[in-house]
């Protein structure tokens, strides 16, 4: 009976020693599977500029086309009126000088009156005015993810933003593509 007890105790001691040894081995050997804690996520952002047409309707005032560009009608009518008025003054050869002077002054005045009328002869229309503006664009191309597993900090590039932890299998991060 003593030998059975000794054998049982020996077996129990061997199992205890083996268990302690396995426990120590597990403590000293890092895990290859489990979960890593995510400590930092930095988006990888691509930035560029794109041209875009910016158009708007604008009200503009234009001068109507002029039929008498040199204002001959205004000059002629002014000269006739100025000559008639000048003819009312003076006598003899003075009358001829007053008529000629009235015609000259009337012609100049008629020319200027027609010029003012032509400048005021306008119309209003709406035109579309466009210019090119540069718009800032950006897109997130992925994420640089820093994580801690077995007290070691690592960084990996991922297509999608992760949660607070990452699954590790056989020492590698499990991503959706795998």
Image: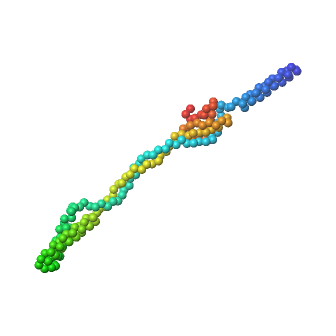
Q: Is residue 36 visible?
A: no
Residue 168: horizontal and vertical position, in percent?
63, 34
Figure quadrant of residue 21: top right
Residue that protrudes farthest toward the left in the picture:
92
Front position in the image: 92 or 25: 92
Residue 122: horizontal and vertical position, in percent?
28, 63
Front position in the image: 162 or 151: 151
Q: Residue at x 43, y 46 (%)?
A: 50
Figure quadrant of residue 17: top right
Q: Residue at x 13, y 75 (%)?
A: 96
Horizontally, residue 178 falls left or right of residue 19, namely: left
Horizontally, residue 178 falls left or right of residue 126, namely: right
Q: Up-down: is 23 above or below 123?
A: above
Pick the quarter of the image with the C terminus: top right
Residue that protrudes farthest toward the right in the picture:
2
Q: Residue at x 77, y 29 (%)?
A: 20
Horizontally, residue 90 falls left or right of residue 41, namely: left
Q: Residue at x 15, y 79 (%)?
A: 90
How many marks the image carries: the answer is: 0
Figure quadrant of residue 143: top right
Pick the quarter of the image with the N terminus: top right
Residue 51: horizontal and vertical position, in percent?
42, 47
Residue 57: horizontal and vertical position, in percent?
36, 56
Q: Is residue 89 visible?
A: yes
């Amino acid at each position: 009976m003593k030998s059975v007890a000794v054998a049982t105790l020996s077996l129990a001691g061997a199992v205890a020693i083996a268990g302690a040894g396995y426990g120590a081995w597990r403590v000293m050997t890092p895990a290859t599977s489990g979960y890593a804690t995510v400590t930092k996520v930095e988006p990888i952002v691509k930035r560029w500029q794109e041209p875009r047409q910016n158009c708007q309707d604008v009200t503009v005032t234009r001068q109507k086309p002029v039929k008498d560009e040199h204002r001959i009608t205004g000059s002629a009518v002014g000269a006739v009126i100025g000559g008639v008025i000048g003819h009312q003054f003076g006598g003899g050869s003075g009358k001829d000088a007053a008529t000629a002077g009235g015609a000259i002054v009337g012609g100049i005045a008629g020319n200027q009156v027609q010029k003012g009328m032509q400048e005021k002869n306008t119309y209003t229309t709406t035109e579309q005015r466009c210019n090119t503006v540069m718009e800032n664009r950006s897109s997130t191309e992925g994420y640089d993810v820093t994580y801690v597993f077995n007290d070691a900090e690592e960084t990996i590039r991922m297509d999608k933003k992760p949660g607070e932890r990452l699954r590790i299998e056989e020492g590698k991060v499990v991503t959706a593509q795998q």
